[in-house]
């Protein structure tokens, strides 16, 4: 209940930003100079989705957009495209939140998987239409699959390390959630 105070919400927003900075930092480290044959999961996307589903008050749209735009700039992706797709994906899942509060984890995971596949393939299509040079499709598909597989791990770590759990009905009512 302490995390529903304004100070607690702002603290958790700062935790989300700090977590995003750590993820981007490790993605920028030159650990290997050879091209990879595999794609790591998009932990930042999975984290944004998990936090959006569990505590939408911790990740408002502007925060998601700014964090993902920063990641686009740092990771040398086309600025704004992936940030927009992640924002749309998170907002879509947030709009499903009242109905999915009672949804078991398997249903949540299925919805997240569909959203991850849709965002990844839409990103690929838009970049193709704009004639932007891209990596091999197998790497993109592998990253989508690995991100889906790691989503439960991200949720478990978010719950255990940061206490990001689904809102209880009483907490949701105190925050003014719709029924």
Image (cartoon, grey):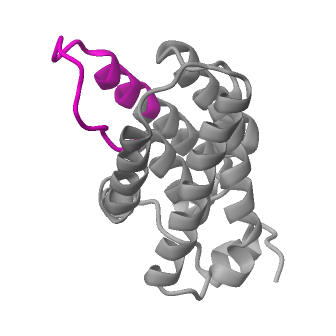
Please name whichever residue, 44 or 17, is drawn nearer the observer in this view of the structure. 44
Where residue 90 sits: x, y (%)? 66, 53
Tell me if residue 134 comes above or below residue 119 in the rendering: above
Q: Residue at x 64, y 43 (%)?
A: 86
**Can you see residue 154?**
no
Question: Residue 19 vs residue 90: left or right?
Answer: left
Quadrant assignment for the C terminus: bottom right
Q: In the rendered structure, does residue 53 fall within the stretch colored magenta?
A: no
Tell me if residue 57 comes above or below residue 83 in the rendering: below
Where residue 113 sits: x, y (%)? 50, 65
Magenta region, residue range: 20-42
Where residue 133 sits: x, y (%)? 55, 19
Give the quarter of the image for residue 130.
Answer: top right
**Can you see residue 80?**
yes
Magenta: main secondary structure equals: loop
Question: Residue 49 vs residue 160: left or right?
Answer: right
């Amino acid at each position: 209940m302490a995390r529903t105070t304004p100070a607690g919400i702002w603290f958790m927003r700062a935790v989300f930003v700090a977590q995003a900075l750590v993820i981007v930092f490790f993605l920028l480290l030159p650990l290997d100079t050879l091209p990879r044959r595999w794609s790591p999961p998009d932990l930042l996307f999975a984290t944004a989705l998990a936090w959006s589903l569990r505590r939408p008050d911790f990740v408002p749209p502007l925060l998601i957009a700014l964090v993902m735009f920063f990641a686009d700039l740092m990771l040398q992706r086309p600025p704004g495209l992936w940030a927009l797709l992640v924002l749309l994906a998170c907002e879509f899942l947030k709009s499903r939140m009242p109905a999915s509060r009672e949804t078991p984890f398997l249903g949540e995971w299925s919805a997240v998987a569909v959203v991850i596949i849709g965002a990844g393939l839409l990103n690929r299509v838009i970049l193709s239409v704009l004639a932007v040079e891209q990596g091999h499709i197998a790497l993109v598909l592998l990253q989508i699959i690995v991100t889906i597989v790691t989503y439960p791990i991200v949720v478990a770590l978010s719950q255990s390390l940061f206490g990001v759990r689904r809102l209880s009905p009483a907490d949701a009512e105190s925050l003014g959630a719709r029924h």
